[in-house]
Structure formats: structure tokens, C-alpha cells
Image: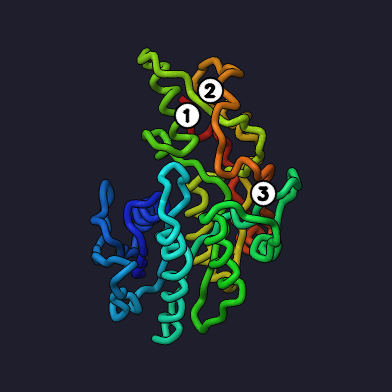
Amino acid sequence: MIISIIGTNGMLSVALTKYFFVKKGCQVDVYGLDVPKGYTCNNFYRVNLLTDELKYDVLLLSDIIIYASGAGVQAALKTDSSLVYALNVNIPIEITLQLKKRGYKGKYISFGSYMEIGLNNECGRAFTEKEVVCSAFSITNDYGLSKRLYGRYMNDFKSDFVYYHFILPNMFSEDDLKPGTRLIPYTLQYLQDYNAGKNPSAPSFSAGLQTRQFITLEEMILMVDKAINKNIPSGIYNIGGGEFLSIKHLIERLFAVYHVPCRDEYFGKEVRRDGDIKSLRIDGNKIKNELGELPNSRIEDIFKI
């Protein structure tokens, strides 16, 4: 089986390549601007998605094509808006159109985000696939809007090849133990430094009152693989399940795992890009009906010492 992954060195592309590269019977080809770092693939095709055309003569030989490129997910990086819309909307749309035009016969996979839901005060409500892609709630950042635009396109997309567009909640991973700007790596870096006696500066968090849904990256990839193997029908699928809790509760539980005191003065110092979105949660029943399960790992299962 030839699996082509478009995108290099992002969280999704790296994790997907690592998973399928060690799976028996899989050849993994990677397309992107930067040479893969810290992982291996069977073939790497250097391509600037913004200026170059993909090698469609080679790409069309793929049994599975996974679009795992993108931009804007990390607010701290302050990505240019034009790049966000190019990588999250224009380029994947062009790829799907080219695959249709050229008679592709395999499976195409892409990813959305529950950030598409937008500003809402409906705490605890789990949104279905239709409610996510057809949401009329306001969106206050380019990342969420770009994902909404592409999600609406995929909602009405039709082709002769099989396609899956998976909408994802927040994800955490064993790789979060490495330093990073996202919330969990940032928190874990402080906790590790604290326990190592490095006397780190006190962390700075938002009030953390917003509630979010968390699954593991590893479970998400297993769900994608099962969908491929079971040949579920084309369409949009929420990968729900996992845990639903406030950001503050998440941080408190991480501190508890490391047996580090979590002080109230750490909270309320930062303003997050999505802080106005009180609740984000997706209903995973559609894919559960197809695969028989949903992600169910707890934070303590991944980060236990």
C-alpha cells in the first residue's frame, strides 16, 4: 500500500508518517518543502506547495493521500494570514480538483478543526458534523475561518474516489513532553524543570475557564487507520470522545501528575486567542457507529511518571 502524506515536520504529518512507516506492507511517500527531520519515510519529494505543482503522475499511484499540511494552529507563531488561507483552503481544494480531473481511484484524507464552530456559550453541547460545518457562530481568527471555509467545501464535495474529512478536537501526545509553545508542552516544560530543581520562572496562564475536548494524537491516527481499513463511506466525520474539561482543570491535573503545587496566581495573566469561545465539543457518534469505538485515554495515562 502506497501512502502519500502532503506536509513535512508538522505535528500531524510527522505522527502519521511515523505510524505508517513501521506498519507492515506500507510505503510512505512524503511531499513538502523541508526535508523530514527526526523521522524516516520511503521517498521524499521536495515541493513548495505555494509555487510548485505536485508530481501528480507519482501521486496518482497512491492508495491513500493524506493532506496534513496547514498553518495558523499555533497563535504564538503569528503566521501571515495569506499563508493560512493558502495552505488551509486554496491548496487542498486545488488538490481535490486535480484528483477528480485526473481520475484518481484511491482514498483522500484531510482534517478540520472544531474551532470552526466559533464563538458560543453552549457549555457542554456536543456539535454534530452538520452543526460544525454549517455553524453560523462568529469566528474571530483566520485559522478558524480558514478551516470553516474548507470544511464547507468538503461538505458539498463529490467525487468518484473515496474521501474522509476528519474534524478534530484538541489533541495531546507523548511528544508534548518536548519543549514547545502550545499549552501542554509549555506546562510540562515548567513541571519537568521544577522537579529537576532548575527553579523556573512561574508559569503564566489564562483564567482557563473555557472548556475543551481532548483526545490523544495516537488514538486519532488509530481511528484514521481503522476508517481506511474498514472502507467506511465517504464524508465528514467528527473524531470525538476523550475528555471534556476546563483548561484550568487540565493544568491542575498535569501539576498533580508531577506532584507540583498549582497556585491560583498562575491563572488570569494571559489572554488566549480562543478565550472568548466558552465551550468546544464534538459529537463522535457517526464514526463510532462505523468503527465501534471512540478515543478514551485520560491525561494521566499519557503523562504518568
* Above or below, 293 relative to 162: above
Asked if residue 114 shows in the view, the reply is no
- The x and y percentages for residue 267 are 58, 25
Q: Residue at x 46, y 46 (%)?
A: 74
Asked if residue 198 shows in the view, the reply is yes
Is the residue under label 1 in contact with that under label 2 (CB below 8 Å)? yes
Inspect the image, locate mark 2, and give the three-letter code of the amino acid beneath it: Phe
Label 3: which residue?
281
Relative depth, front residue between 171 and 146: 146
Q: Earlier in the sequence, mark 1 or mark 3?
A: 1
* In the image: residue 305, left or right of residue 52: right
- The x and y percentages for residue 97 are 45, 80
Question: For the residues marked 1 and 3, what is the alpha-carbon distance in whole angstroms?
Answer: 22 Å
Category of crowding for the residue at label 1, using alpha-carbon neighbours closer than 10 angstroms: few (below 14), some (14–19), many (at least 20): many
Q: Which mark is residue 295?
A: none
* Above or below, 251 relative to 245: above
